[in-house]
Image (cartoon, helix red, strand yellow):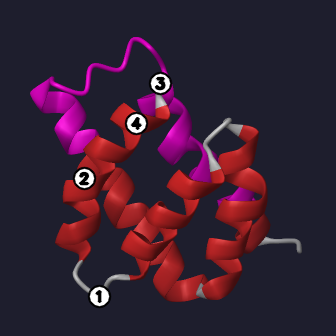
Amino acid sequence: MLGFPDFIYKHIVPACFLAPLKPTFDLSDAQTVLTLSECAVTLKTIHLKRGPEFLQLLQQECLPSLQVSAEISQELCRVIEQPDSKVLKNYLKAFFQRAKL
């Protein structure tokens, strides 16, 4: 897979997870809530454009490489599939709180 999809999967998707997983990323700060909202919009948009391919990449490569359990990965993918993007925005904070443990 080359071109723009490759760039998305190698750079943009990991960025949505790496920053919020850092110990210095304060999930209770108002600015971080905005960041999580942008991450949610980005993940939702990629899913709308790439579909099941994107979810498969998350579950098989991206999230395992960040030591996120299969159970939490599957839960995230189910939330990404929800039609209402607000569901994902609300879920991400809890996801990162659990993933940081």
In magenta segment, residue 32:
yes
Q: Are marks 2 and 1 in contact (CB under 8 Å)?
A: no
Q: Which badge, 1 or 3, comes first in the chain's sequence?
A: 1
State the mark number for residue 21.
none
In magenta segment, residue 68:
no
Secondary element at tag 4 = helix
Q: Nearer the viewer, residue 45 or 82?
A: 82
Q: Are marks 3 and 4 in contact (CB under 8 Å)?
A: yes
Q: Nearer the viewer, residue 78 or 23?
A: 78
Q: Given the current orientation, which residue lies at the most extreme right position?
A: 1
Look at the image and give the residue range highlighted in magenta.
7-35
Residue sitting at x 29%, y 87%: 83
Mark 3 Cα within 10 Å, few/some/many (few <14, many 20+)?
A: few
State the mark number for residue 37.
2
Residue holding disc 1: 83
The amino acid at mark 2 is Ser
Mark 1 Cα within 10 Å, few/some/many (few <14, many 20+)?
A: few
Q: Which badge, 2 or 4, comes first in the chain's sequence?
A: 2
